[in-house]
Amino acid sequence: MGAPAGFVGHGDAVAVQLKNAPDFGEVEASRCCAAMAVRILYSTAPMRLVKLRTGYRQSLSASANLHRGKVHMSRVISTIRGVGASRIALPLLALATLAPASVLAQENPDDWKFAASIYGWFPDIEGHTNIPVGSGDINVDVGTILDHLQMTVQGSFAFHKGRWGGFTDLVYLDVGESKSQTRTLELGGQPLPVSVTTNLNFDLKSVFWTLGGSYRFVDEPGATADFLAGARLASFEQSLDWEFSGNFGPVTPPPITGSRSSSLDQWDAIVGVRGQFALGANGKWLVPYHLDVGTGDSDLTWQGVLGLGYAFGWGDLKAVWRYLDYDLDSDQPIRDMNFSGPAVGATFRW
């Protein structure tokens, strides 16, 4: 006996062959579902095909199971027709279209995209400050005093939709140092007398908060570039404790011991550009860059960042060199300040 129409016997397997099914009408859906049911039934039936010289002959057990399969098939077809093939076809069509739609949604360039970064920036600090004392000033060369970072909080967040976006960046630095028998201070712009030394404790707290918008004018698989416009707040708070010892001679001395503090807030408008480009055949290595310049309360401020990174599926890791400079009014407690040093961090993207 030959294999039933629509099936081909091979060992214990039965393969379903569906032909000429151009669309999902009720008749075709019924035939498909019935064929699937028969395939399940026949896959568990103890069928054995015996190969003869002139062809294939089924055993009596297979014939009996085939008869029972036909009875089950007729019942399945009746059930499907009773329920309605359209009720089965519609969910199948919905499932078929669901996955491609989700993939397209993920690749839509107009979707919102976000990036959050945590990093550590460890700069050397240079600058000059004036501490009013009586009729004169104590002048501090910050670079000769500050060596120890006491506390820092740093991070950034950015988003964009299409070519437009926004960003914010926050840096908090608390740096301080104590020195004994030093001559690093000046009085009214003049060095201390030769016989005079100072015990001092100097602390500088700095906050830099940048907020702005961006427009992406280069958006390629291996390179991006954004135009930036926004504002940056620079907040400085300094304190100095001192104790002089020695003979001032004809120089009018300041208080032998004392403590002074001062603060300064600067708001500046900034413009700039930032982005990154890929290196290597797989584009995993990145070169991030950032440059901005601004003015407002300060005479001039500018910032530059350049480094190297590596991209992962979740985001990227970067190591950069960051430089931030402020040129302030000469009559301010802080005349100028710059921060320069390495930064390392991770960026998470979603």
Image (cartoon, helix red, strand yellow):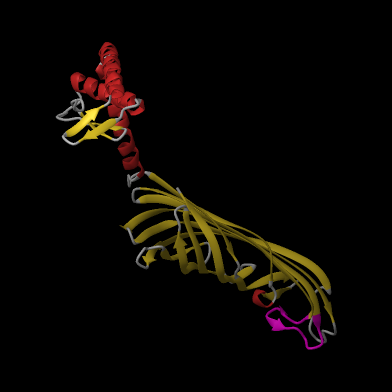
Does residue 328 show up? no
Q: Name the residue nearer the viewer: 193 or 120.
A: 120
Start-end of magenta stretch: 182-197
Q: Residue furthest front?
A: 53
Q: Is residue 200 above or below residue 108?
A: below
Identify which residue, 220 or 18, lies in the foreground.
18
Q: Position of residue 233 (x, y in %)?
A: 55, 57
Q: Nearer the viewer, residue 46 or 39?
A: 46
Residue 292, quarter of the rendered image: bottom left
* Residue in the image at 21% along x and 28% along y: 3
Q: Position of residue 211 (x, y in %)?
A: 49, 53
The residue sitting at 61% across, 72% down in the picture is: 124
183 to the left or right of 317: right
18 drawn magenta: no
The reply to whether residue 4 is in sight is yes
Coordinates of residue 178 in the picture (x, y in percent):
77, 72
Is 184 one of the magenta-colored residues?
yes
